[in-house]
Image: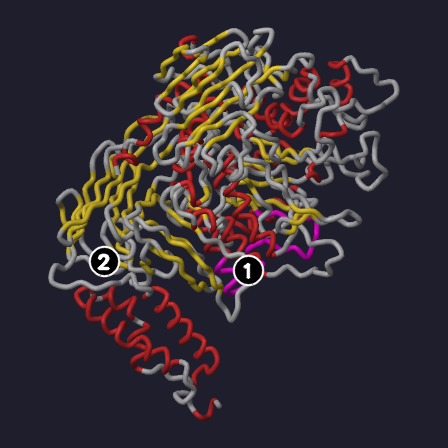
Amino acid sequence: MKKRLLFFSLFSCLLLFAARGEMRDGQADARAIIEEGEVRFTVLTPRVIRMEWDSLRQFTDDRSFVVVNRHLPVPDFEKKIKGGKLIIRTDELELTYRLNSGKFSAENLSIKYKNKNNPFTWNPGVKQQRNLKGTARTLDRMDGTTFIKRNEPRHELQLEDGILSRDGWTLIDDSKSLLFDNSDFPWVEERDKNRSVQDWYFMAYGTDYKTALKDFTLFAGKMPLPPRFVFGYWWSRYWAYSDNEMRDVVSRFEQYNIPLDVLVVDMDWHETDSLFSKPDAWDQRKHWTGYTWEKRLFSDPDQFFDWTKSKHLKTTLNLHPASGIAPFECQYNDFAKQMNFDTSTRENIPWQGANKKFMQTLFDVVLHPIEKQGVDFWWLDWQQWVFDKDIPTLNNTWWLNYTFFEDMKRNTDKRPLIYHRWGGLGNHRYQIGFSGDAYITWNTLEYQPYFTNTASNVLYGYWSHDIGGHKFIEDDNVYEFEPEMYVRWVQYGALSPILRTHSNKDPSLVKEIWRYRDEYYDALYSAVRLRYQLVPYIYTMAREAYETGVSLCRPMYYDYPEEELAYTYSRQYMFGDQILVAPIGAPMEEGVSEVKVWLPAGNDWYEWHTGTMLKGGQELVRCFTLEEYPIYIKAGAVIPMYGEEVNTLDENPNRLIFGIFPGREGAFTVYEDAGNDQQYDTQYATTQVVSQTENRMQRITIAPRAGQYEGMTDSKDYLVRLYGAEMPRTVRVNGEAVDYTALPDSNRWSYSGKDFVVSIPVPNADCRNTYEIEVEYDKTDSIDVNDGMIKQMKELHEAIAARKFKYAGNYVVPEVTGFCSETNLKVSYDPAGFYRYIRYFKDNFQQAMEITLKDDLVSPFAK
């Protein structure tokens, strides 16, 4: 508990230190440097050492594309020279180098990791055997892990190596990395191609993966904290939407009370008349690149953006920049003038990503004016040549991510944000990710959780997938979009970094939730609502990722590195610190999805959608209907939530819910800030909540809020929800008794028998004060309500409804069935009878189900 309560304060000092130097401090503290002839060693942390060899002794202190900060607090270490060898010892490592022996090799360099549980000795040339992998640039044209494109051979996706390995160490060879210069807008700088140097970073960590990730952030930079709205629902479709049609879509969201935060406008926002003409000089279809508004669809872009702002929506536009600036663009002449480009031939001004003047002109002349109209961030969609034409080792994806992110950081007071593919190590500083045009198959859905979780091993924690898939496989003769697959994809998306539905320009691909009926609509709507419900938890975990490098979605082995099953269950993941997800990746059989799940030892796990408390330390098979999903909450967890009134994340909602789950004591520190400012490293607030139970008395303490940020209100409406709880006898807030009501309101506590939840409002709470909620349960009686009763009650209700629908007025509800099916309401109407009603249900549920499913209670006239 102390670790959680002290979390933000413990890391803030390191955060401030590292954040200040992320793009300015290539020079390490002199006290951390040991230079001996042709070699230089820099002790960055007790577990990380930089090792350089340069025959000319011209060591570099410039920032590289991977390493942007070396000016770190100097760790304790000792240096000595003995027998012609240099020995450097930290608390974790012992490095030995034979002096005056030249380049690093197995003969002159060794590093011992002194951890008693996972000791090892490393020498140059030793290869990792068990790298845990990182991520890949894109999932374009992937059916699961298989690349499929007409007239091309199929091949399997290969993930890049990550910075974590079961070997317990990682060597980052930075010798050939590109560098940043020291200009105001740091620009790419090549190393001297005529020199041979070694520039290595050795990381040792054993199985302490979280510490390794934190160490990496110290010298490679932090994961940024995205704006709060990023964690809402994104509506995206490759479709030639007009202003009118966009308004129609949003009105449907409002009509059906579906939350929405981001409108994605694909490439048809600009002129695309010649899209299907022959390729241009850059082998791109004409008008694939574009910057001039298509006035037949958006007659007045300023008015369009005024409308989106009025709806509290953020807007992103798609860019394919590879063809440069064409003569038909409205910005062509101004751009050419800035670049001294000869316009007499009316040729395109070619793309020059490494040319600083070209890129600054692109921002100043073309993009900033559109940003002033109202676009909030850019969707970069580079699909063309991998490397720059002027600097052959400059990856275009990496560089676009950096330049666009950095320009937004410099040009606005909002948090920088881009939306593009992965460019390589170091790109974690410029997020979020667009995984590309994956195929609509169960294989793709099955693979994406592993792909997403594993990307955390390179700190790329915000992959955004085309939820529901992008398009059908060519020549596969599949043209029907499966509702069940879409439901399972959206359910996964709600528990992934970004929830964004998207699809190809295909009228058969229906992803509007309101176009589904019955159980499909209910499941889709519930998934989106669950996403918004969990946003305070998600946002707090995103802050944790900023401070520690541990992503929202992370593999099981981060928390359970010594458990072999943590590596076996590679699709299963932790969703933040308190929630485990075992995603569904296959169609149902006989109306249910069977999922094999591993619940780690150390605590029990509450299966949220069925209301079942399960013991940790076991593998088991669980079954889920369409509306259910395998979500497991750590026993005793405190999960901050929003209520159903929240339909946009543009502002901080006034009501904050603390969901407290059964099983043991728990605590959580919820994070909040202004939502989209660049001052979040120092301007934020936290509220600590602690739940303790003793002698049938549960105490929930809400501590005074700590911290400050712009726009912060003095008060909030708190609501405490106790999940899986028995009916209380009394409820007190700061010593004063609170009345009970069967009809929930903002002043009295209530009980929901549908999911066994106690709701205790604390209205207009002064956030500067402490609030203690005491919930007293019956000391003479108790009963387990967390054995799956929630699922049983739901099954009984559905069975009765099905019989009534089949036989209408000819069906008579049996007495035992009726009494059992009304249990959820009885306990709220008559709290004093709680234990009697629950025991009756437990004793009679099986009989009630059997009788309900028989036909002999149906009138013979109906048969």
Q: How crowded is mark 1: few (under 14 residues within 10 Å), some or many (20 or more)?
A: some
842 magenta-colored: no
Q: Quadrant of the N terminus?
A: top left
In the rendered structure, find residue 241 and report the number of the disc placed on it: none
Find residue 355 and report its image quarter.
top right
Quick check: 508 left or right of 573?
Answer: right
504 magenta-colored: yes
Q: Which tag is nearer the camera, tag 1 or tag 2?
A: 1
115 and 577: which is toward the camera: 115
Task: Give percent across and percent down for residue 46.
Answer: 39, 22
* Residue type highlighted by circle 1: Ala
Callout 2 secondary element: loop
Which residue is disc 1 drawn over? 586
Callout 1 secondary element: loop
Q: Which residue is drawn at 40% across and 23% down?
A: 93
396 and 499: which is toward the camera: 396
Quick check: 395 left or right of 638?
Answer: right
Quick check: 372 left or right of 88?
Answer: right
Which residue is disc 2 drawn over? 741
Q: Which label's residue is closer to the chain start, 1 or 2?
A: 1
Q: Which residue is drawn at 16% across and 57% down?
A: 777
* Residue type highlighted by circle 2: Thr
Residue at the front extreme of this rendering: 83
- In the rendered structure, which segment of residues is drawn in magenta? 501-523
